[in-house]
Amino acid sequence: MKILVIGGGGREHAIAWKLSVEGHQVFGAPGNPGMAQCAQLLNTSDYIAAAESIGAELTVVGPEAPLAAGIVDQFRARGLRIFGPTQEQAQLEASKIYAKEFMQRVGIPTARFVRATTFETASAALKEFSFPVVIKADGLAAGKGVIIAHNAAEAEAAVQTLGPLLVIEEFLTGEEVSFIVISDGKNVTPFEATQDHKTIHDGDQGPNTGGMGAYCDGRIITQADADRVLETIIYPAVHATGFTGFLYAGLMMTTDGPKVIEFNARLGDPETQPLMHRLNSGFADTLYHAAGGDLTGTALQWKADPSVCVVLSAAGYPAKPKTDDVIMGIGAAESTGAKVFQAGTKLTARGLETAGGRVLGVTASGPDLPTAIRNTYAAVEKIHFDGMHYRKDIGAKGLKRW
Ligand code: AMP
Ligand code: GLY
């Protein structure tokens, strides 16, 4: 099958890699230097023209921005098969206020919240919460629009930084889980649960990022919890919206059961990297059928081996990433058996250089989680660029379950 993958980050490299491993002819727009190894890149932002020029039988969208801009509606209007949510469904991610009001209306468990539209209402709303309190900007912010404030001064500063359109909500405690499904509008096929590591430093310290690493080992939640997530969160959301695409529920597993921290209308980054590494077969077939509105009869097969992805970020990320540093050692890292997914990279006369905050996602497996973690860090150590930063504790939460 000819498949077009829209996007150019680590998630899209992992999607394109998996589809090409499954034997498909993959195209990427705009792609990145890593994707060029498994896909033919089309240097255009006219995605409809790109899909038509290659005769794409399926288009898969990675990032949120084209979804929020209505790419799925536009493709469908031209009779082109595309997997993703409509512009309206993508509001579940694009607007936190929309998502919270949707959850309240449909009865999906989530943190208690107040919506604020002015600085004055935000300051007043803060009085309804104890500390820590969570303050979220309404729009898309690449994982960086959330501040957890521990006292009144921090909360007021957060309101000034992120406001005036805000969601202010109660702080939930528990383990965070990324629960992602493929939805055809009625039926869903879940991926295995993954765990992301959102803050820049070990031990969940420092500012939030888009995600510094993730793992997938089949043990993150029990089957009973997965069933509860499907019943109380995923199916109500899908049935209320007719959601098509990847529906990502960012969950807090609280003592009162799973609650939604956020919905995303796409696959997670970096969750996709370990998911694609661990997925055995059935990806393209499942997406094709889901895009046609009929998931029945398709299945995803998983490998037994857990997988781990460690993100290598540039100096200064997430505030102001440094770029233009030469990257060495990807070949050496891959010769250990790891797969290095590229994100913020570019090819220049000097070779491969850094071009963004999250540069690479080094991904490896092993017969058990401790070995998968060791294998991933052994590959990480082969790579170098100036200012390279990574967390040393990716997967550590999972070790408690082994
Ligand atoms: P979000 O962009 O909504 O996913 O928030 C980013 C991160 O902030 C989440 O992954 C959590 O680690 C943290 N967070 C967001 N909302 C809450 C909450 N209500 N309680 C505790 N932590 C939260
Ligand atoms: N890794 C979190 C996200 O993709 O939103």
Image (spheres, rainbow, N blue to C red):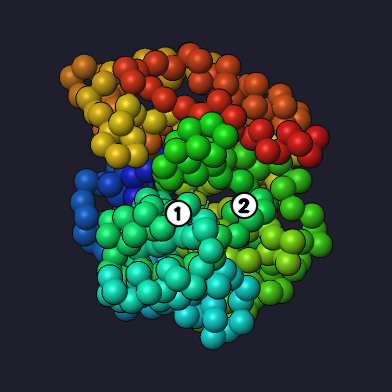
Kind of residue indicated by mark 1: Asn
Q: Secondary structure at mark 2?
A: strand
Label 2 vs label 1, nearer the camera: 1
Tell me if 389 is positioned left or right of 216 in this view: left
What crowding class fits label 2: few (fewer than 14 Cα within 10 Å), some (14-19), or many (20 or more)?
many
Could you say which quadrant of the image residue 62 lies in?
bottom left
Percent of width and height locating residue 339: 52, 29
Report how many numbered discs are placed on residues in the image: 2
Mark closest to the chain's N terminus, 2 or 1: 1
Counting from the top left corner in percent of width and height, residue 66 is at 31, 62
Is 43 left, or right, of 191 in this rendering?
A: left
Give the alpha-carbon distance from disc 2 to disc 1, as whole Å. Answer: 23 Å
Q: Give the numbered dot on residue 189.
A: none
Question: Compared to 184, does 31 lie above or below?
Answer: above
Q: Decide which of 251, 8 is in the foreground and name it.
A: 251
Mark 1 neighbour class, 10 Å CA radius: few under 14, some 14 to 19, many 20 or more: few
Q: Residue at x 43, y 68 (%)?
A: 126
**Quadrant of image for the C terminus:** top right
Q: Nearer the viewer, residue 171 or 103?
A: 171
Cβ of mark 2 under 8 Å from ligand 1: the answer is: yes
Along the line of sight, the residue nearer the viewer: 129 or 209:
129
Reading the image, the residue beneath label 2 is 176
SS at badge 1: loop
On screen, residue 333 above or below 53: above
Please tell me which residue lies in front, 350 or 378. 378
Residue beneath disc 1: 151
Left or right: residue 377 compared with residue 312:
right
Picture quadrant of residue 395: top right
Residue 179, horizontal then vertical, whole percent:
62, 58
Residue 290 in sight: no
Which residue shows up at 67% across the image and 28% down it? 372
Amino acid type, callout 2: Glu
